[in-house]
Amino acid sequence: MSSSIWNDATVSRRSVLQGIAAVAVVGFTGVRFGMSEALAAANDKYPEDAFKQKSEADAIKSLYGKTAEKSDKVKLDAPEIAENGAVVPIAVSSSLPDVTSIAILVTENPNTLAAAYRILPGTAPTVSSRLKMAKTSNVIALVEAGGKLYSATKEVKVTVGGCGG
Amino acid sequence: MASTIRVRATASGDSTEVQALIQHPMDSGFVKDAKGQLIPPHYIQQVVIEYDGKPVFIADWGPAVSKDPYLKFAFKGGKKGDDLKVSWTDNKGASDTLTAKIQ
């Protein structure tokens, strides 16, 4: 299953599960977002394909369809050393105006994209959560603001991996 | 009625800070159990937080989010006593919803 992402409306198990609204949209319009945009405005689809990508470039492309430029206005707060890769606290914030989304990538994980957050109007461009890291890796924070994509990168050293059990 | 969701939303000034903790295994699909069998992926894919009938924050998660995920963010608006609705859906179609009062 290739094709696009946020707007990929293939009738998969996911979309069936995604709730009546999504099912209705997918079912009636066949595919494509287009005319269903108003209906689905508050019901943005889970970017399934982006989460399957192995490389950071593919994940960014799949999620945003553009490339990111480095910016010191993206603040990535992550530990230098994570003793436990299963729980690595990561916070991203930005001083850029009009932030619409924040995504976090862990380049050495089996699938690079870890989390993507949609920042709706009125919501502060800052988010904290905890991620798993397989091993020492670069963590990339992406911030989409005013239609452009910005990034910051930090290496986090992991002493015990979070994916080996 | 034990919920899988715990939320603390605190209004201060003109914004509300939300902290949510969800109980979920967040199995990545890469880990083996004691018998050497792969534990199939089981993770939350989407968390939606709604205030006043409108989503203020949507999280799309992959299996790399830690077990029993934690989330913190803030949005403009929200008063003490208002409702805040938090819901999640996982890759197996399970879901849960909780409506909490802003403190």
Image: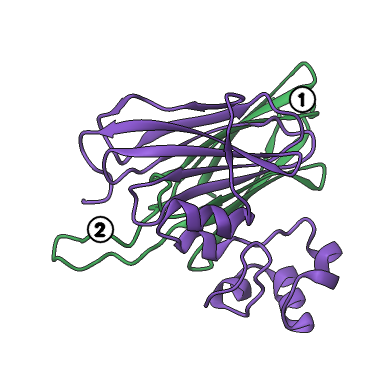
Residue B93, horizontal then vertical, whole percent: 53, 68
A11 relative to A18, above or below: below
Mark yes or no: residue A152 visible.
yes
Q: Residue at x 28, y 60 (%)?
A: B30
Chain corresponding to purple in the figure: A
Q: Residue at x 57, y 24 (%)?
A: A72
Q: Residue at x 60, y 61 (%)?
A: A46
Q: Are marks 1 and 2 in contact (CB under 8 Å)?
A: no
Residue B9, horizontal then vertical, whole percent: 65, 29
Q: Is residue A159 left or right of residue A144?
A: left
Residue under circle 1? Answer: B80
Circle 2 — which element? loop
Which chain is indicated by disc 2?
B
Q: Is residue B35 left or right of residue A1?
A: left
Q: Three-letter amino acid code at disc 2?
A: Val
Which chain is indicated by disc 1?
B
Q: Three-letter amino acid code at disc 1?
A: Lys
Residue under circle 2? Answer: B31
For the residue carrying disc 2, how many other residues have a C-alpha within 10 Å: few (<14), some (14-19), or many (20+)? some
Indicate which disc, 1 or 2, sits on the residue closer to the N terminus: 2
Q: Quadrant of residue B7?
A: top right
* Near-viewer residue (B32 or A30): A30
Residue A151, horizontal then vertical, whole percent: 55, 36
* Near-viewer residue (B56 or B81): B56
A76 relative to A63, above or below: above
Q: Quadrant of residue B75?
A: top right
- Could you tell me which quadrant the C terminus of chain B lies in? top right
